Amino acid sequence: MAETQTLREWLLTETPTSRRHAKMSALYQGWLSFRSNTMAMIGLGILVALVVVAAGAPLIAPHDPFVQELSNRLAPLGAEGHILGTDSLGRDILSRLIYGARITLYIVALVALIAPIAGLLVGTVSGYVGGWTDTVLMRITDIFLAFPRLVLALAFVAALGAGIENAVLAISLTAWPPYARIARAETLTIRSSDYISAIKLQGAGALRIITKHIWPLCISSLIVRVTLDMAGIILAAAGLGFLGLGAQPPSPEWGAMISEGRRFILDHWWVATMPGLAIFTVSLAFNLLGDGLRDVLDPKAGE
Amino acid sequence: MSMLTVENLNVWFGSNRDRVDAVIGASFEIPRGESFGLVGESGSGKSTILRAITGLAPDWSGAITVDGQQIGKVRPKTFFKTVQMVFQDPYASLHPRHSVDQVLGETLHLHGFKDIDSRVVKLLDDVGLGQKFRFRYPHQLSGGQRQRVAIARALAPEPALLLLDEPTSALDVSVQAEILNLLADLRADRGLTYLMVSHDLSVVGHMCDRLAVMKDGEIVEVLDVAALRAMEAAHPYSKQLLEASV
Amino acid sequence: MMTNLLDVENLWVKFPTRQGVFDAVRGVSFTLGRERLGIVGESGSGKSMTGRAILRLIRPPGIVEADQIALEGVDLMQKSEKDMRAVRGQRISMVMQDPKFSLNPVMTIGDQIMEAYRLHSKASKSEAYAKSLEMLEAVSIRNPERVMRAYPHEMSGGMGQRIMIAMMLIPNPEILIADEPTSALDVSVQRQVLDIMDRLVKERGMGLIFISHDLNLVADFCDRVLIMYAGRIVEVCDADKLHEAQHPYTRGLLNSLPRLDAPRKRLEVLQRDPQWSTAPSVSGRI
């Protein structure tokens, strides 16, 4: 017990003794703040469960998600061997949900990597350099903002064929402009700070200032915004899947599952509702996580 | 031997109808090793002069000569080895996500020093902060400690001229005394030249040899600190300022 | 014999933090009559917290404890939040440091002053307007009608602060708490604002609590001075006797100020004695 006490003290110290110590201390204190928010912890818990389920799908899923059992179509909840029933082709819904988690995570990860990074790059360069660069980049941003997500996805599908990667690309292309705007707004505020003036007086160039000084400050608000947007992105992917533009059958993508179950919604409601509940839960989890992160990372909350 | 000469300096912001003239026709000269004060109230243009010298105010005209070199539109790298600045607000002049070690290390790196570690240690000692502050972040430092870090950062490239923009106005009285003593010691040890901006006449009276009084962008008078102490100011505005300060 | 407007006894203000409970104000006691009382201290001394505690402006998780905070004999600590709203502004008012932050930027000045007036009296709009004009003239504002129509950002610092004073004095309170009222102002304007405050406080027979970090200013302006350090009062003295102060902290503060009329090579640096924060608070009660 004495050992864990000193570890906590070590992490909460006011006088760090090395770079690593300082960083870990900062992270730990951030974690303590986050941990005190019950709702955020619930969100985090659900997402951790999602990752675990997706990773352990072959071990957790009771059935193969692609195996059809036409004699056992549309089995209700609680049926023998199928807790959540079966769909119109007799495939186990629970197993499809579990494997579908992988697809959901794949979409989330890809979009979270492409959109905010593109937005950060465009926004910070635009905000810092100003002048013509700013005008041009912001007009390009406006052009992408003008595209409705689903219409762009349709265009992509028409041009490149349906599939999950194209769906992700379409979503990313419409998701990055708001991040560019946030990054630009933050950059404009930061740009006039004394600490930026100070580093300019050391002869620092624009590249160093943007990457080492501005990015670390923008990243918190971007992380919060991305997390809160995740719900929308998952729904967009589900929507595309629903329209048949995203994941193609027999892929167990949750949106596509809802689409398949649409026909049976009156008598066999669980076929569409179960994947719907899954989408709802994950979106809610991201929202709760985003709220919690904002409380911890938002500089206005007092640093 | 003049360290800094400013001739007919005009600094303005905006253009045409929106143009605001912050500094009008300012001229003064600081010999090497002297401590020169710039006093005035808010809006007098004193901080703007510092920004024009360091290149942080883009629109200016006139002549600025530092250590014999005339300054053009762009400042060469060597300029920043000669001239450095300490900012007013210690809570705003350090990057919130960088530790003290990172701030000093980056500065030394940018100026091409190789023995960064030992220099960081020495700088922290020179400004009276111990090694235990080295890895702290700004929010773990008090106002006075932050200002010491800002001074250490300014001293890192071993400059000859230090521009001080109200270095103690955001600090408590007892901390101010420490910082002013530190600045005086550093100047004596290293033969630095100071250009100090302040609204507080008693601080300028303590730290400087000569001073210029500014009002609405213009220098109305340049006087010796001895004259200031004897309450002998020629210009009516300077007199007014003196009376209000005592 | 001065009647006591305010009697504060054993005031404590505490804030729970991750590292334990932080005591911002520790056992402060003082009385206020129809006089100007200065509270001087550096940042972290608890002087602003004391002012806010009197008005019960400190919200949870902050904890305020006192044996009593008596306004003309009635203990404010016993009052409900609803009753306190009748006290704030009406009986005790507060002027803060920067009018940029204490005046509402989206309302005209006239609207704000009239609102302040009508909150505490059943006046009609035209009565409130007339009273506001009267008040603005009382703080030496030459063109009150124009100012009534203007927005705060159009005013200079000195004018903004005078408007704040007008707004805070319009309900005719008995006590004014001024928290660093001139710290954001230029030196030439400070004197003007202080003179106005002085005149109004004397005319109305009010009590004034003047909180500041500027020892000399307070000595000049007030009748009695309390010097605070680390949440405690370390010394109480008459303003004109400040330069004969006994406590080493006060002496240290006085000696660390650079002075035009007494030049020195080095300023005396305050050597903090841990005893100052552990010794009990000196009582400022008469």
Image (spheres, rainbow, N blue to C red):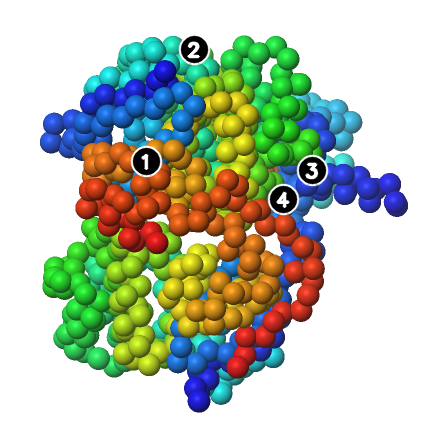
What is the total number of numbered labels drawn onto the structure image?
4
Q: Nearer the viewer, residue B189 or B166?
A: B189
SS type, badge 4: helix
Q: Is residue C134 above or below residue A71?
A: below
> Which label was assigned to residue A15?
3
C-beta proximity under 8 Å, tags 1 and 4? no
Q: Is residue C152 left or right of residue A124?
A: left
User: Is label 4 on the same chain as label 3?
Assistant: yes
Residue identifier under label 1:
B224
Residue A154 x/y as whole percent:
38, 20
User: Is label 1 on the same chain as label 2?
Assistant: yes
Residue type indicated by callout 2: Thr
The answer for which chain carries disc 4 is A
Q: Is residue B235 left or right of residue A296?
A: left
Residue C183 x/y as whole percent:
38, 54
C-beta proximity under 8 Å, tags 2 and 3? no
